[in-house]
Every structure is written in structure tokens, then in C-alpha cells.
Amino acid sequence: MQGPRRGMDMAPRAPGIFDTFELKKGLVLRSRVVRSSLGGRMAAYDGTVTPAWRNFERRFARPEFRLGAIISATIAIDDKRHSPLEYPKLSDDRFIAPLAAGIEAVQKQGCRYIVQIGDPGGHTQTSLLPEAADSKSASRWFDGYYGYRNLSAPMSRAEIASAVANFAAAARRVQAAGADGVEVTASKGYLIHQFLNPATNRRRDDYGGSVDKRFRLLEEVVQAVRAEVGAGYLFGVRLSAADFNWLPLNLRLPPVWPPRDYFMGNTLETTLHYGEQLAALGVDYLHIDSGFGFVNPKGSPGRYPIEGLRLFANSARHLSAKAAVRATLLNLVPAPLARAVLGFGWRFVPAPNAGYARAFRSRLGGMPIIANGGFQDRGVIEEALASGACDLVAIGRPLLANPDLLERFACGEAPAKPCTFCSACCTRTAVLPLGCYERKRFRTRAEMEQKILEWSSDLRP
Ligand SMILES: Cc1cc2nc3c(=O)[nH]c(=O)nc-3n(C[C@H](O)[C@H](O)[C@H](O)COP(=O)(O)O)c2cc1C
């Protein structure tokens, strides 16, 4: 019997988790799974990263864990707008050296490091003292869920120009720190997303009023960042494929017309158009999630995390009347009722953004696409990669629960205690140390506490 003739009858093998991937010419990732952004209080008060941050990131990078790359937490580009307190900043050159030391520690282990930069704009959740800067956004609106300022305030043209310059300067610092690439977040309901979303961008100047005008801030940021880092440097954009403005039950006031813009925000049709423009502007890859704001059931599927949201709301209640009322209401409403009303639409869906990623990948043929959210099951990850929905999969919470997820897969196993997608980590991270707070995953509370406190320590295993 004759075997298949080499190079003629053999169909190309579908990509798998442990295959390498060239994200940009010469920049090869050792696997198809990357760690998604996981922000926590790992900086000094001024925003300088601490050894806790370096230890935390370095742990994910271990060779046996086989992650292709780590994407950093959203690092703040604006000196005033924290993202949030004690999170890292890149608004000044003094932040470069401490960041570089951590990046080198990751890279030494064969893992790539991409720094995500962003500006929370009018959704800045917390601050030391109330800051006028924290209300700055595309337009004026009231949002009962996100941000602590009573009302957002439209940015002047000078403020927009300064935000663009901040992105470019931060990108230069990312490159100077030796990272393998820079990613701009145009997602998570952050400033750029506030300009893209028709419910939060009510402007009638060059930066709002039509699909293309809403894109203008992102366009200027992309041009400025590319000019700063040069054509050869890896540069990606995290983009929300669909906004779902009404989730979690939270509609901004006053309403906008038409209702589709108000309730849904941008849908795939528009974001694919944005994707085409980003490709034309020379962006190297898109990192696709969905939803507007953070935590959001579309981007971070799970069970409505009422306990954590209460904790967070309480921690910011001193900052404004809105924050105080929000905290009081969240504390008063019984948890089952809050889950039923505010948690409408919150349920776990595996890989909710794989379909969106597929749409981008087929429309933008050739541009690498990362799919984010709801990946843990090996079969789901393999299916997304093998079926061509995406080139890379980004994982957050399941890796926080089991950083050795890929090592387990390589041994033919699944994690003994998988992530339950409870989102307790998300809602606690701005207040408490970053770690897994799912009590069910630990034998005792003491064990959970010890694991959380160990995460950022210098211990080897
Ligand atoms: C504790 C925590 C912190 C996060 N911090 C960030 C962040 O700084 N920037 C960001 O873009 N996404 C952040 N995310 C969102 C994750 O990157 C990811 O998109 C989300 O958790 C969904 O993926 P998953 O289902 O794999 O967890 C965070 C998520 C968690 C759980």
C-alpha cells in the first residue's frame, strides 16, 4: 500500500494549542494561547510597578506553563486618570525602568510580553480625591453603573489632542521598556470606546455625529502610536465587536436616537468597518471581545457578581453623590433581586466572542485575530483554533485559577479545580489583592488566603 505523496495529498494540519504562531514578522509565540490582561493593585501610589507585579507576571511566563505571550493589565497613559488606584502607569519616563525589569524577567522564560495601554476617560472608577479629569469623555451623560463622577464632561479639542499625545508617548515608553509589542485598548468602555459608542458620543463636531467621525479619535491614536513606534514594531488594538449598551441593566441618560444606537450601541456591521479601517492604518492584529464597560456579561461571562460589586461600590462611595447613592442601592437591594434585575443577561457562555472573531478573521483575511473570553475547556479552545475562528486565544480568569492550564492539557489532563467564572477576582481586584476568591475552589478559607497572598511573592512554586 502506498502512503500519501508528501506535499501533494496531505491536507494542511489544523492549528492546535501548542503550535507556534508568528504574530509579526520575526515575532514568534511558542503557543496559541496568551494570558489576557489581569489588572491589580501592583504599583506604588504613584503608579510605579512593584516587585509584586514582576513576580505575578513572571509566574505566568514559566516555560512549563507554555503560554505564548502575556498581555499586561491596562496601563494608564494619563497622569490624572487612574485605572484605578495603585495600578501601573506609563505617563512619565520614570515608569520605564521598573517596567523593563519585569518584562525582561518574563521574556527570559521564553514568553512574549505585550503592554496594553489605555485611558478610562469618564468611566474612571475610583480616585484618591474627586478629580475633574475623571469625568472627561466624548460627551455629557449620566451613567448609573460605571464611573464615579455624577456626570461626564465633553473633552475639548485640546484635551483630545493631549489624550492622543499621551497614547503616543506611552507607546514610546512601552517600546523603550523592551516589550514585544503595544496594544491600545479601544474596548472595556474606556475613553476610545466612549468615542466609538453612539450612546456615549453625542458630539456634532469632527469627533462625533457619524460612524466615521466617532472613529476619528481611534484613528488619530493609531496614527500617532504607529508614527512613534515605527512600522516594524508589533501594534495591536483591543476592540469590542458589539457593545450591548443595555447590559448590565444600565442605560445612560438622556437617551439618544435612534433606539438601536441607544440600546445596542455599535454592532458587528459597524465594528467590522472599523476593523477594515484599522487594517488599512497598519494595525498588526485585533484582540476581539464584546460588551461596553467592565465587568460585562458579554466579555466576562459568568454569574452576576453582586457581592463583589457591592464591595467595590462601597470602596468608592466617598467620591461623589452618585457613588454614595449607587453603593446604598446596591447594599439595600436583596442579592437575589439584584441578580434577577441587574444580572439580567449574565450567564456563562463558552467562548462568547469566537463567532465575532471569526467574522473579523474572514473579513480581514490575513490579519491575526485574538479571541477573548470564556475559554477554559480544551475542546472549545481547540475548536476555535482549528476551525479558523481565531489565530490566538486569550484567557484571563481560568489562568488566574490554574496558571498551569496548558501544562495540564499537555499531560492529557484537565484542571482538578477549574475556574467557575464567578468573577469574584474581577470585582475584588481594585480593592483587594489580585487572586482567586472562589471559596469553592479551596478546602479552607486559610488555604484561599494563603494562595492569594502568595501569588505576588517571590516563591518558586
Ligand atoms: C481580575 C481581572 C482583571 C482584569 N483587568 C483587565 C485589564 O486591566 N484590562 C483589560 O482590558 N481587561 C482586564 N480584564 C478582562 C480580562 O482580560 C478578560 O477579557 C476577561 O476576564 C474575560 O476573559 P476570561 O473569560 O478568560 O476571564 C480583567 C479580568 C480580570 C478577571
Image: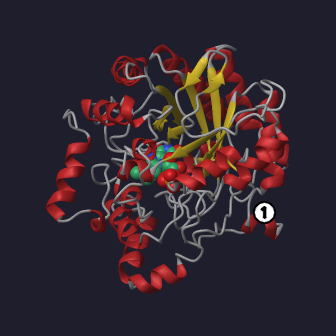
Q: Position of residue 367 (x, y in %)?
A: 75, 32
**Residue 126 in sight in this render:** no
Question: Going 17% across and 58% down the picture, which residue do you hit?
Answer: 447
263 or 347, which is in the foreground? 347
Q: Position of residue 213 (x, y in %)?
A: 82, 42
Picture residue at 37% right of the left edge, 57% below the top: 425
Q: Measuring 38% from the left and 18% from the top, which residue is drawn there?
A: 108
The quadrant of the image that shows the C terminus is top left
x and y percent of residue 189 in the render? 59, 52
Residue 12 vertical placement versus 203 (above, below): above
Q: Is residue 99 left or right of residue 261?
A: left
- Kind of residue sitting beneath label 1: Asp
Compared to 260, does 240 lie above or below? above
**Total numbered badges shown on the rendered structure:** 1
- Horizontal side of 188 relative to 319 (left or right) equals right
Residue 217, image quadrant: top right
- Is residue 404 visible in the rendered image? The answer is yes
**Residue positioned most to the front:** 1
Q: Residue furthest left?
A: 446
Q: Can you give x and y, in whole percent of width and height, for residue 453 in the image?
A: 20, 47
Image quadrant containing the N terminus: top right
* Residue 252 occupies quadrant: bottom right
Tell whether 128 sits left or right of 453: right
Q: Nearer the viewer, residue 126 or 376?
A: 376
**Residue 168 image-quadrant placement:** top right
Coloration mode: secondary structure
Helix, strand or loop at label 1? It is helix
Neighbour tally class for label 1: few under 14, some 14-19, many 20 plus, Cα within 10 Å = some
Q: Which residue is mark 1?
A: 261
Nearer the observer, 332 or 178 = 178
Residue 139 to residue 117: above or below: below
CB of mark 1 near ligand 1 (< 8 Å): no
